[in-house]
Image (cartoon, rainbow, N blue to C red):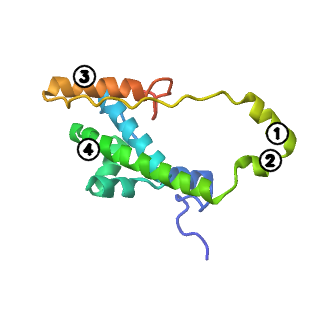
Amino acid sequence: MPRTRPDIPPPGTDEAKARRAAKVDLSGLDDLQRQIRDVVVRTGESAFGSRWQSDLAQALGRAPQQVASWVSGKKPVPTAVFFELGPIAHDLADELERRAAAIRTAWPPRSAFAPPAEVEAAAAAAPAREPEAPATPEPPPRTLAEQEAYIARILAELCEDEEPAGPPRG
């Protein structure tokens, strides 16, 4: 069947993929809102994979369209969502660790699949790791100023040594 719309690119082409890609415009968000959005995006992608928005919306008890509006920059992520997402993120990380442990239990170590020379080199190069001490929880911030300061501190820790997500602001 011949194409009847020459203005629409053929399926599978780079132009068609770009046309389908989510449109992101963060110009209406301030720095703190962009950082919160970036943490939400990274958390969703890390916890749920590339098709994460619906799963994150369900975990937060929100509509998928609402999460999509945060991702696109159409609306800022509400501050309350940042505080809701913290415990959810830890629960998701715990679940991912349980799943990883189940996979490791089911399979022999990676070294069982490596050539012997690689096993010896990896063992010689591996640094010793010490367990991390559990952090003491701090009381939740009460005032808006305390919440913003808390969010800024957490975001600074999360964003250390990372490139900002999204297009540069101009």
Do tag 2 and tag 4 residues touch (Cβ < 8 Å)?
no
Q: Between residue 29 and residue 161, name the one nearer to us.
A: 161
Viewer can see residue 30: no
Identify the element where label 1 is drawn. Answer: helix
Q: CA distance from mark 1 to mark 3?
A: 48 Å
Image quadrant holding the C terminus, namely top left
Q: Amino acid at mark 1?
A: Glu
Viewer can see residue 122: yes
The disc label shown at residue 118, or none: 1
What residue is rendered at 55% in x and 52% in y? 101
Q: CA distance from mark 4 to mark 1?
A: 44 Å
* Sequence-first tag of 1 and 3: 1
Identify the element where label 3 is drawn. Answer: helix
| x then y, percent, for residue 105 | 60, 56
113 horizontally vs 91: left or right: right
* Sequence-first tag of 3 and 2: 2
* CA neighbours of label 1 inside 10 A, class few (<14), some (14 to 19), many (20+): few
